[in-house]
């Protein structure tokens, strides 16, 4: 039993659920009466609660539990959704998020709970009042009162209460291991396995973690909810060897609580507990459905995928050899088998290739709530529109690109979008819009952040740059607009007159620029005063899978990314024209240059005077060019690989790929060819 | 004992023309037979291209051309020595790779001006072992691609 492994899963899943909470809360704000959304939030909160309780993060469990209660109230129309409420809920999720982060960083996820819980409870006060009568509903289970040394939290008590109402029994079980027991951890594990078959372990003392790490003497106590009789449980536990004694008692919540109450006066708290208990009943039913959906994905270290990919490529090389041998041998059975193997391995290849790809939505999905929060903090009204969230990027790029985009978005909200009053004065709609768009083009992925805000004031930028000493008076002349805009990404520059918490002190944009450049991309800015700005990030597709057209040039194979191809054609000699001593063709009414790839790539030409020429029309922005090739081979999905750090910046070659036969083929960067 | 370790250098010995060269074993990743090399256009003449080395695209340079020795046909004994330097993996084409030996460091002498046909710039030192003369190659110099950079993008201007 490796607890760190569980912890990783816990953190990953918690993050997923928190993500869902955020997303759905924002949707809820837009359509407050949508029951499906509320259900989903409720389920996410519920699962989160269950998980954190199991892992022993009680603060996390308490908060999620309260959160769940609120949604239960909403679900049954006892509370209506209001905007302020969403704020509070989003804040709560923020806290949850920070707690999970703390856990991920090795902390205990501890947080001051009371204030949040009480705030959340104010939301459902109405409900609490209505339920006050239920206070009388105290059950009395009389049995031997046994002392459990650890404290139960409200959440655990509520489960115990509820289980009783549903006809289950609560047992307090003390297991004494034999003194000479060698593998205490293993025995504990076996006992827990038995217990989990019988019911649900609510609490264990010492904690599960301590037990697994063998941080206990020789006995431990658990509280179990089960429908099985006491005797059966005892017998089953005793089947585990090296156990000295098993003591089982009925556990009574009311007795436990009475004991507790002696210590502190907590009438109000108790009221809440009862309310919680009520909620709990309805929520338990959902437990099973959420559990089953947890196992659809597994997490794999990306390095393992790299290894898998490389191993597979070696296999492909051997496949090529086998194919060769089978054709030589002319054996039907062998040929059939090899053919089959080829088919299977092509499928396998596709699977492996797509495994590494992740939709950029993973990064984008957290932006709406961030934008919303920022806009509120700054008293601005901002809508965010996300386009192309399904654009797939390699996992490694996804991991890096989040922070720069966050920064640009903050920048757009803080400096770009004006206050509602100012926008009205300018004749623009009160609400600003930020568009976040991702798309593939050529060998690159573009991410554009467009806002309809104030735009960049050139004069201001120039003055600032001069006064900050970023450039000298002389350098100013001859700067293009673009160059001026790009000054704001120099270090030591900030156009905001006031320094705000949001976009910092002008150390931000230069970091963004550096990060993007370190990823091999670049960033450009375009802007119109009072109309808005566009920040365009261009990222290389390194490590991504692209569709290419394989072409042949004198037996050398080259790959042209499909994304930059408009079409392919075969033209006759007469169609090639000459303009300014350059060969051009007429392509649908447009004169476009004809580029002979053999000249570009220094390939010996055989016979130039052929009747027909195969061409590939490629684009760069709105410019076109026709590339002359010998033959088209076909379309293929390939993994883009770099040529290695020894060969950098090779002209018109953006990388290489390994073809099915194990040979390396170069990928043409048509952007470099079109001038 | 510690003394002995410090004064021994394990090297891989390979052949170019009639001369024997050596690089430290620590810098050698593997030694491969010649396989299909994909030419990369617009690079220096000694860059033969790239190969698929177990899924990694690895650049290959012809060490003869690199060191200014006349080219020759590849044959059965031709090998590609994959070396590793500063995060770079590069394959060197050599006539033959046939030995791993320990050289006591006291037989290593600084390079004379010119050894055979090879410019002393690329040489770390020479080692005399009985009747053999081993030229220790300075991989850093061999792989510094200043010349390569100059030749970059001839049409890109």
Image (cartoon, coloured by chain):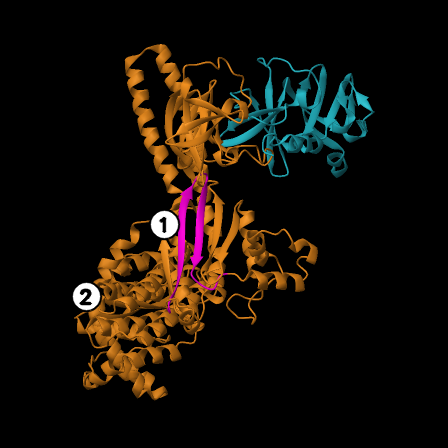
Chain colours: A orange, B cyan
Residues drawn in magenta: A430-455
**Is disc 1 placed on a helix, strand or loop?**
loop
Q: Residue A468: tell me if it is visible.
A: no
Q: Which residue is mark 1?
A: A388
Q: Nearer the viewer, mark 2 or mark 1?
A: 1
Q: Is residue A465 magenta?
A: no
Classify A270 as above or below A325. below
**Residue displayed at 33% across by 64% down:** A21
Is residue A613 depicted above or below A234 in this figure?
above
From this viewpoint, is residue A271 visible? yes
**The C terminus of chain B sits in image quarter:** top right
The residue tagged 2 is A227
**Chain ID at mark 2:** A
x then y, percent, for residue A115: 39, 80
Picture quadrant where residue A28 is located: bottom left
Residue A313 position within the rendered picture, expressed as x and y whole percent measured from the top left: 43, 30
Q: Position of residue A600 (x, y in %)?
A: 54, 26
Label of residue A450 in the image: none
């Amino acid at each position: 039993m490796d607890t760190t492994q569980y912890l990783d899963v816990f953190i990953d899943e918690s993050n997923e659920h928190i993500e869902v909470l955020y997303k759905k809360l924002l949707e809820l704000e837009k359509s407050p009466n949508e029951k499906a959304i509320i259900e989903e939030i409720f389920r996410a909160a519920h699962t989160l609660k269950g998980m954190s309780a199991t892992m022993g993060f009680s603060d996390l469990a308490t908060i999620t539990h309260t959160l769940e209660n609120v949604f239960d109230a909403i679900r049954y129309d006892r509370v209506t959704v209001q905007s302020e409420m969403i704020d509070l809920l989003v804040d709560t999720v923020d806290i949850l998020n920070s707690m999970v982060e703390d856990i991920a960083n090795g902390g205990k996820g501890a947080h001051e709970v009371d204030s949040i819980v009480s705030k959340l409870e104010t939301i459902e006060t109405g409900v609490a009042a209505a339920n006050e009568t239920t206070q009388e509903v105290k059950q009395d289970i009389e049995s031997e009162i046994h002392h459990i040394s650890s404290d139960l939290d409200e959440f655990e008590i509520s489960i115990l209460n509820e289980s009783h109402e549903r006809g289950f029994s609560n047992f307090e079980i003390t297991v004494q291991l034999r003194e000479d027991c060698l593998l205490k951890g293993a025995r504990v594990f076996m006992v827990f396995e038995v217990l989990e078959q019988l019911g649900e372990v609510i609490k264990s003392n010492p904690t599960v973690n301590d037990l697994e790490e063998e941080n206990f003497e020789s006995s431990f106590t658990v509280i179990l909810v089960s429908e099985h009789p006491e005797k059966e449980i005892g017998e089953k536990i005793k089947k585990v060897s090296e156990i000295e004694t098993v003591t089982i008692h009925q556990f009574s919540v009311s007795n436990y609580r009475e004991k507790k109450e002696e210590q502190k006066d907590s009438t109000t708290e108790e009221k809440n507990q009862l309310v919680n208990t009520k909620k709990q009943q309805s929520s338990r039913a959902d437990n099973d459905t959420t559990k089953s959906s947890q196992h659809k994905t597994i997490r794999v270290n990306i390095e393992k995928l790299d290894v898998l990919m490389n191993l597979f490529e070696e296999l492909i090389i051997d496949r090529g050899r086998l194919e060769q041998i089978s054709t030589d041998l002319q054996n039907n059975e062998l040929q059939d088998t090899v053919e089959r193997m080829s088919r299977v391995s092509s499928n396998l290849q596709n699977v492996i290739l797509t495994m590494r790809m992740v939709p950029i939505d993973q990064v984008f999905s957290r932006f709406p709530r961030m934008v919303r929060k920022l806009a509120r903090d700054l008293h601005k009204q901002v809508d965010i529109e996300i386009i192309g969230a399904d654009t797939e990027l390699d996992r490694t790029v996804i991991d890096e690109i989040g922070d720069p985009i966050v920064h640009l978005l903050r920048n757009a909200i803080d400096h770009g979008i004006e206050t509602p009053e100012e926008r009205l004065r300018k004749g623009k709609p009160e609400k600003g819009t930020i568009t976040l768009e991702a798309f593939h083009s050529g060998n690159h992925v573009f991410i554009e952040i467009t806002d309809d805000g104030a735009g960049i004031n050139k004069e201001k930028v120039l003055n600032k740059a001069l006064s900050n000493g970023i450039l000298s008076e002389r350098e100013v002349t001859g700067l293009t607009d673009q160059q001026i805009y790009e000054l704001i990404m120099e270090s030591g520059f900030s156009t905001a007159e006031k320094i705000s918490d949001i976009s910092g002190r002008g150390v931000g944009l230069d970091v963004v620029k550096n990060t993007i450049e370190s990823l091999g991309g670049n960033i450009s800015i375009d802007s119109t005063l009072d109309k808005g700005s566009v920040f365009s990030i261009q990222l290389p597709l390194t490590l991504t899978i692209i569709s290419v057209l394989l072409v042949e040039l004198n037996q050398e194979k080259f790959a042209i990314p499909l994304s930059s191809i408009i079409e392919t054609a075969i033209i006759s000699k007469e169609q090639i024209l000459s303009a300014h001593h350059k060969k051009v063709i007429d392509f649908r009414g447009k004169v476009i240059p004809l580029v002979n790839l053999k000249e570009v790539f220094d390939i010996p030409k055989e016979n130039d005077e052929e009747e027909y020429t195969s061409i590939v029309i490629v684009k760069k922005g709105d410019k076109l060019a026709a590339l002359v090739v010998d033959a088209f081979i076909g379309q293929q999905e390939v993994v883009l690989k770099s040529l290695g750090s020894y060969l950098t910046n090779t002209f018109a070659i953006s990388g290489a790929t390994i073809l099915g036969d194990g040979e390396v083929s170069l990928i043409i960067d048509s952007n470099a060819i079109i001038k | 004992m510690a003394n002995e370790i410090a004064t021994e250098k394990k090297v891989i010995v390979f052949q170019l023309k009639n001369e024997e060269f050596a690089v430290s074993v620590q810098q050698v990743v593997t030694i491969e037979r010649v396989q299909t090399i994909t030419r990369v256009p617009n690079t220096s003449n000694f860059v033969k291209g790239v190969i698929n080395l177990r899924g990694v695209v690895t650049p290959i340079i012809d060490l003869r051309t690199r060191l200014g020795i006349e080219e020759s046909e590849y044959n059965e004994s031709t090998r590609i020595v994959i070396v590793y330097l500063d995060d770079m993996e590069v394959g060197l084409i050599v006539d033959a790779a046939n030995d791993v030996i320990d050289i006591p460091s006291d037989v290593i002498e600084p390079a004379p001006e010119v050894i055979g046909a090879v410019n002393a710039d690329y040489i770390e030192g020479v080692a005399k072992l009985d009747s053999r003369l081993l030229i220790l190659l300075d991989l850093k110099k061999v792989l510094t691609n200043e010349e390569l950079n100059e030749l970059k993008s001839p049409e890109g201007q």
